[in-house]
Amino acid sequence: MQRECVFGVAGAVLLATAGITACQGDASAAPPGAARVVKDTDDEAVIELSDGRRVSLRYQAGTGLLERHRSAGGKPWSHAKTVYATKTDPCQGIDLKAKRATVTVRANFGQYCRDGEPPTESVAAVGTGGLGKWDTHLAKNWDGWDRVDIARDGKSATFSNKSSASTTTLDWRAGKGFGEVTTTYKKLGERFLGTWRAEDGSHQVTFRQSKLNVPASATVTMLKGPTCKVRMDLINIWEDRVQPRGAKVLEGEKTTYCPPEDFNSEYVVATAGGPMELRNLGDATALVTYRKP
């Protein structure tokens, strides 16, 4: 798909409608350090830097992601350099962004990816200065980076992917390259934290707050009857309810409410300081009522 006159980020498209003249303005009208994408197709993207240089990233079948550049004034292109080597099919286009002499790239690869399958290889890359060297990061079986933000001075950049449950980031620093991928999960409301005991005394549920790279969790422990202790991640979190997922058995064997039914249960604390209820999704009837001891 051809997209034209995209400024700053490949993929942020200016749509022309009847009576509107699109693609007005040029690089000279852009703020200092800005860049403009002058070509953006499924297989190649070209960005013009604020100093007039142009940088091209393109897919080549059986080779991977190739880069070349040229100085201002239409001089010859450099020899193509392989930024990321792979024989896997590309998909989702190539996203370029630049600040001053720093250029960032987001690209994805995956078998049948162009047919709708998710990518299996997600690449983040950064080139600086004369563009003779590129820092590259590969994430496997990852949906890809949603965006990248470059510092004004071009000396750092952050790639990110945000969902309703978490934000995953990858930082790059000039002279240091890429750091570690980190995920910050949604915080659990204070009303849930701590231990809740079922009114019949059969079991208890302990909620723990999320921390870096670790989601909030709930641990169910049977106090009567057969031994069972399970831990569940809390991904879907709202102010008054949470939905546990993916129970892992820590002790004994699964039994009634240890764990609650996966994908069909939620813990609800309707008001701060009030009791907690275990319910089936879409049903206000309490299966179990809990109180803090």
Image (cartoon, grey):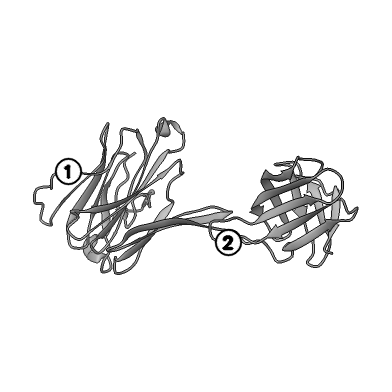
**Are there few (<14), some (14-19), or many (20+) residues within 10 Å of tag 1?**
some
Direction from residue 113 to residue 44 in the image, left or right: left
Q: Which residue is mark 2?
A: 211
x and y, in percent, of residue 88 in the image = 34, 33
Q: Identify the secondary structure beneath mark 1.
A: loop
Q: Is residue 76 above or below residue 196?
A: above
Q: In which quadrant will I find the N terminus? A: top left
Label 1 with label 2: CB-CB less than 8 Å: no
Asked if one can make out residue 132 in the rendered structure from this viewpoint, the answer is yes
In front: 266, or 209?
209
The residue lying at 62 percent from left, 62 percent from top is 187
x and y, in percent, of residue 238 in the image = 68, 57
- Numbered tag placed on residue 4 in the rendering: none
Amino acid on which the number 2 mark rests in the picture: Lys
Q: Which residue is mark 1?
A: 80
Please name which of the two marks, 1 or 2, marks the residue nearer to the observer. 2
Asked if one can make out residue 286 in the rendered structure from this viewpoint, the answer is no
x and y, in percent, of residue 201 in the image = 88, 54
